[in-house]
């Protein structure tokens, strides 16, 4: 038979290793050794941390970097698994969706430090007197900074699956499980990878907070780049900060080259387009693995297993009953479901109220709200400034494809770059010029998040159809008219996407940014971020809860009242093509 | 049973309406009857929006009728029935799967083991003229080749009924013609592993060229206006006078205006587009205008 021949011939040739195999093998084995080595450290008893505290010796940095990298890797794996399960359930079940999507919305607005406060005790008790507990708490904290936007992206993709492909899967009798792996996951892949990269950047920002954990009396400092930076700030060690920046730079580049580039190049086939577009993304790493023979032969069984698993005839309810008038969802069950949700919400509200009212009074709530409004003002002002600065620049770059190609990775790197490292500069400047911390600490909030606006605007401007540009110039549209009538409407949906991310990130960053320190100098700005940060440090749980709840409410309201309508407007009126 | 085999598809009095934005129901199919037997190519011909695609999707089990009965081999259609495969206007190929993987998809869903699957897929690819493109991705192929993949994917499951939703309308004229004749050749040679074909089209010549029976749909709401048997033997020649006559005939039927409505009796006279005006000479009209313009 013809197919047999092809197959055996391919395998026979594949078994002879070539030179690329050696290179790839070294890389794979090296990665495994590093993972095992890093993993061994985590099962050490907790007292080990006190015996060998984090030191500023640069020779330790590679090991610290390794531990941080492993934590982030574990967190991204957890985020991916969580995303697959949560998004799949939310997209497939209408009743689950009613609860799960708003919950996700709230979770997204809960600041990462808030999660840390509650989970650190839990995880420490799970593995008493072992480093593992603290490690898990740290991983969980990073996870919370990564998972939500990935889940949203996957959910959105699963809802937007092209109709004809959906019909094809139905018509060819694919089971729900098969459909999930053959249609939903591949279709969601590009968005998911993009968001995973964003998440990774976001994770770096919180590495300091999640490695040097201080909650009330519990202080755990896990060896890692984050705690190295924290110590360097505490000891006013500028060279150490510089070393940390250098290490982070290297790690971010390594992540990009060894993990994300290959994934992007590989995932190019999942882009939903019917015609091949210009230059596909490339990766030397992926090319290397594609050139290996023996390694590929080893991976064959794995891909066979993968295929067998995705072909399992597990039937779960895959079809939303949208096209079937007969299977109208029963009103009764809907009603019951709604009642259950309302009852449990009321119960949770009552519990919270009872817990908070035992220690807090109305004035505390008013203080939290006041602080929240101050932070809200900061976010609005900062987003406005960032918009005024980055939109024109982004448009200018985006309309020059060659330039955009070079700037895009730079902007991504800047987004990944933890703003905490810039804190010393700000603190020293504020102290020596006797500036008002309430005003001058604010820029720290947007230091890491402004880039989202920039690269979304760049993306929008480069996607702007050239025929529209040509039409505009042939009608002699110029000056402000060109901005108002041509380019701003064109990039609006992209801008809103960027601005939503930037404002969400700024809220989150306020906890880190409104309290900055450099050695013994502590600067405090008034705001909700500082409120939560100081409550966390004091181990004052009721205030932490109150602060987080206030932040959630403000962020959610802001999103619902400002960003969602803008986004919907953009989608409805200004989406091109 | 053998003397009177139950028809492959039996549609009786099917209606289908979709909710409009305003909350009303838009009736797209009204009282449609259709029977498909083994060994025939049936065409659904009509303007866009006449509900023919909806009818096809009812048979494919993707849409359920609002009323009436739809059965496949005597069983009511609930979800896609076994032995029915579909070719899409937009091809509906999975861009992340190669040609071979796309073709194997339907077999994987049926749980065919991998050797058998590979064998049948390669046979289908061979049959439809895609040899050598097994490992290509759809985006690397031309439109005509892509639709060939669509055909191979449908044929590989050996369906009793092949549903085609305007399969050639996204292709350029020459490519479409090649694909059509290839398909008809395979059909008359009996090499297609199928028993019947139901195709939707808005191209009259295409319908006359391929079908044994054509159901002409009228629009708003969609219903079967006429049924035409095409009794020209394959291969058919487009320049054959009888062929041309048939095409002109159908064209005339499809473009025929609905009879003018009788002038409305009730309501205020002078309203409505259907009102017939009395003959009035132009000087009488200008006299009327002068009278109106004159001071009272």
Image (tube, rainbow, N blue to C red):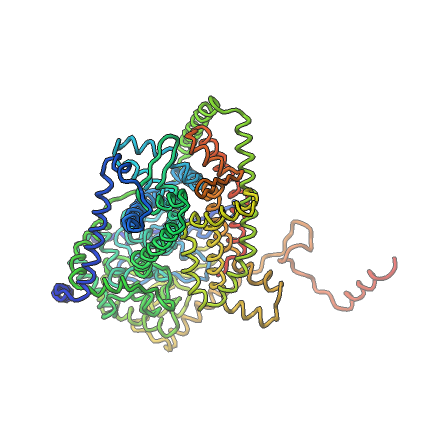
Q: Quadrant of residue A538?
A: top left
* Extreme residue in the right direction: B295
Q: Nearer the viewer, residue A5 or B34?
A: A5
From the top left corner, tell me how far across and down residue B213 is, in percent. Answer: 35, 63
Q: Residue A359, position in %: x, y?
A: 47, 23
Image check: A84 left or right of A236? left
For this rendering, which residue is in front, B142 or B139?
B139
- Above/below status of A375 relative to A192: above
- Please state the horizontal and vertical placement of residue A268, each as a whole percent of the image: 33, 61
Q: How many marks?
A: 0
Q: Is residue A304 above or below residue A505?
A: below
| Rendering coords of residue A504 (x, y %) | 47, 45
Q: Residue at (16%, 66%) from the top-left corner? A: A18
Q: Looking at the image, which residue is at 46% across and 21% down?
A: A358
Asked if residue A155 can be seen in this view, the reply is yes
Q: Is residue A21 left or right of residue B230?
A: left
Residue at image location 52% in from the left, 62% down from the top: A395
Q: Which quarter shows the N terminus of chain A?
A: bottom left
Instruction: Residue at 56%, 51% (x, y): give it.
Output: A384
Quarter residue A5 falls in: bottom left
Query: Which of the 4 quarters of the picture holds residue B246?
Result: bottom left
Residue A192 in view (yes/no): no
């Amino acid at each position: 038979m013809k197919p047999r021949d092809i197959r055996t011939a391919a395998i026979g040739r594949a078994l002879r290793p070539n030179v690329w195999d050696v290179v790839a093998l070294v890389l794979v084995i090296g990665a495994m050794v590093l993972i095992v080595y890093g993993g061994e450290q985590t099962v050490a008893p907790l007292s080990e941390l006190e015996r060998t505290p984090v030191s500023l010796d640069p020779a330790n940095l590679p090991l610290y970097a390794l531990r941080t990298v492993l934590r982030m890797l574990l967190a991204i794996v957890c985020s991916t698994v969580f995303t697959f399960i949560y998004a799949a359930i939310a997209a497939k079940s209408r009743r689950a969706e009613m609860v799960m999507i708003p919950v996700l919305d709230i979770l997204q607005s809960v600041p990462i430090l808030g999660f840390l406060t509650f989970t650190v005790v839990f995880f420490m008790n799970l593995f008493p007197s072992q480093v593992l507990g603290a490690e898990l708490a740290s991983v969980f904290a990073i996870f919370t900074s990564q998972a939500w936007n990935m889940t949203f992206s996957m959910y959105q993709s699963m809802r937007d699956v092209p109709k004809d492909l959906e019909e094809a899967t139905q018509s060819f009798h694919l089971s729900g499980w098969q459909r999930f792996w053959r249609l939903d996951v591949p279709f969601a892949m590009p968005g998911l990878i993009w968001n995973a990269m964003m998440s990774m950047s976001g994770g770096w920002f919180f590495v300091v907070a999640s490695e040097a954990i201080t909650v009330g009396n519990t202080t755990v400092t896990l060896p890692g780049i984050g705690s190295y930076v924290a110590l360097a700030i505490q000891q006013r060690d500028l060279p150490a900060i510089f070393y940390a920046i250098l290490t982070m730079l290297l790690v971010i580049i390594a992540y990009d080259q060894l993990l994300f580039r290959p994934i992007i190049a590989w995932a190019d086939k999942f882009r939903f387009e019917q015609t091949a577009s210009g230059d596909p993304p490339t990766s030397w790493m992926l090319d290397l693995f594609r050139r290996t023979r023996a390694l590929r032969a080893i991976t064959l069984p794995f891909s066979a297993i993968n295929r067998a698993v995705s072909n399992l005839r597990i039937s779960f309810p895959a079809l939303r009953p949208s096209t079937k008038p007969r299977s109208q969802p029963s009103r009764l069950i809907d009603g019951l479901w709604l009642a259950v949700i309302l009852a449990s919400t009321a119960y949770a509200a009552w519990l919270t109220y009872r817990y908070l009212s035992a220690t807090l009074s109305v004035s505390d709530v008013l203080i939290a709200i006041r602080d929240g409004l101050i932070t809200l003002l900061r976010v609005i002002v900062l987003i406005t400034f960032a918009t005024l600065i980055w939109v024109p620049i982004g448009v200018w770059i985006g309309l020059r494809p060659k330039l955009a190609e070079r700037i895009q990775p730079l902007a991504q790197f800047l987004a990944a770059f933890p703003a905490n490292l810039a804190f010393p500069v700000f603190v020293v400047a504020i102290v020596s010029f006797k500036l008002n911390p309430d005003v001058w600490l604010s820029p720290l909030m947007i230091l890491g998040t402004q880039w989202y606006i920039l690269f979304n605007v760049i993306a929008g401007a480069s996607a702007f159809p050239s025929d529209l540009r040509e039409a505009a110039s042939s009608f002699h549209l110029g000056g402000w008219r060109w901005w108002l009538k041509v380019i701003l409407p064109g990039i609006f949906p992209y801008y809103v996407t960027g601005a939503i991310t930037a404002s969400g990130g700024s809220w989150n960053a306020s906890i880190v940014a409104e309290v900055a320190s450099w050695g013994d100098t502590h600067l405090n700005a008034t705001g909700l971020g500082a409120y939560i940060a100081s409550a966390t440090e004091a181990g004052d749980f009721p205030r932490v809860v109150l602060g987080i709840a206030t932040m959630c409410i403000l962020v959610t309201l802001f999103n619902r009242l400002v960003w969602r309508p803008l986004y919907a407007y953009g989608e409805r009126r200004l989406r091109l093509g | 049973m053998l003397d009177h085999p139950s028809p492959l598809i039996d549609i009786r009095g099917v209606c289908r309406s979709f909710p409009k934005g305003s909350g009303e129901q838009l009736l797209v199919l009204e009282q449609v009857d259709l029977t498909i037997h083994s060994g025939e190519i049936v065409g659904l011909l009509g303007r866009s929006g006449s509900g023919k695609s909806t009818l096809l999707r009812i048979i494919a089990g993707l849409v359920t009728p609002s009323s009436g009965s739809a059965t496949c081999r005597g069983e009511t259609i609930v979800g896609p029935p076994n032995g029915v495969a579909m070719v899409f206007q937009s091809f509906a190929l999975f861009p992340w799967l190669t040609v071979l993987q796309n073709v194997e998809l339907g077999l994987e869903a049926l749980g065919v083991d991998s050797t058998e699957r590979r064998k049948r897929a390669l046979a289908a690819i061979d049959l439809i003229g895609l040899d050598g493109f097994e490992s290509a991705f759809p985006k690397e192929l031309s439109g005509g080749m892509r639709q060939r993949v669509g055909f191979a994917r449908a044929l590989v499951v050996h369906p009793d009924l092949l549903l085609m939703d305007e399969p050639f309308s996204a292709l350029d004229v020459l490519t479409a013609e090649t694909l059509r004749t290839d398909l008809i050749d395979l059909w008359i040679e009996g090499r297609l592993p199928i028993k019947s074909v139901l195709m939707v089209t808005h191209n009259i010549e295409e319908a006359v060229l391929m079908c044994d029976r054509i159901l002409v749909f009228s629009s708003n709401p969609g219903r079967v206006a006429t049924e035409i048997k095409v009794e020209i033997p394959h291969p058919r020649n487009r320049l054959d006078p009888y062929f041309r006559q048939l095409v002109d005939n159908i064209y005339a039927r499809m473009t025929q205006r609905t009879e003018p409505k009788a002038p409305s009796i009730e309501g205020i006279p002078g309203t409505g587009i259907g009102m017939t005006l009395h003959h009035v000479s132009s000087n009488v009209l200008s006299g009327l205008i002068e009278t109106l313009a004159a001071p009272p």
